[in-house]
Image (cartoon, grey):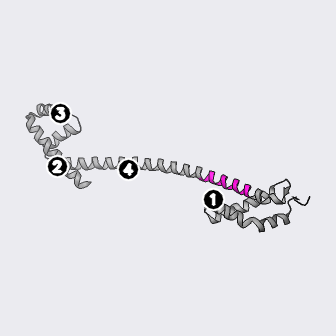
Amino acid sequence: MENILALSNQSISDAYKQYAHCIFLYIYYKVEDEELSHDLVQDTFLRLITYRGEICLHTVKHLLYIIARNLVNDYLRRYYKTQEVINEVYENTRMEACEIESILYAKEICVRELEVVSRLPVRRRKIYELVRFEGEDTTEIAAKLSLSVRTVENHLFISRKEVRNYMKQCI
């Protein structure tokens, strides 16, 4: 029964000398990281050491490859799961950053709009504010300010044009 091997320090040392490089190449092909491959080779032989059964000399190599394959699969499963989580966190952070950025841009645009509106002549500013911020229509404004609808529309047209030109410069 020479083919059956109870694991000893000498037999593991012999298996390491004989198969470590092959196992390394196998693992490196799968994970493409040299340091990680060396670590997984060590883990493979540590698992072999903790194996409690008897091993046939002809199957040590196969057992090592099975252990290495399982370790690589476990690593890759954890790696891809981690990548999923990282991507999800990144996307959520990016979306939140975009939302915050949009809010800041909107506030900046509002500040710029108020800045240019404050420079308009009094009547034009009043008409613009009533339409833009209070939602009134030109006929209501004309009646309120005792102006013709046409005059209100002209003031509104000019004020919108000035605001638009100023905003183009800011953007």
The label shown at residue 137 is: 3
Give the amino acid at mark 3.
Answer: Asp
Earlier residue among tags 1 and 3: 1
Left of 13 or right of it: where is 83? Answer: left
Left of 121 or right of it: where is 80? Answer: right
Q: Nearer the viewer, residue 74 or 148?
A: 74
CA distance separating discs 4 and 1: 41 Å
Q: Nearer the viewer, residue 99 or 91?
A: 91
Q: Quadrant of residue 48?
A: bottom right
CA distance separating discs 1 and 3: 70 Å
Give the amino acid at mark 4.
Answer: Glu
Going 86% across and 62% down the picture, which residue do you hit? Answer: 8
The image shows residue 87 at horizontal and vertical percentages of 51, 50
**Region of the chain picked out in magenta, as a range:** 65-79
The image shows residue 68 at horizontal and vertical percentages of 71, 57
Give the residue pinned by disc 1.
30
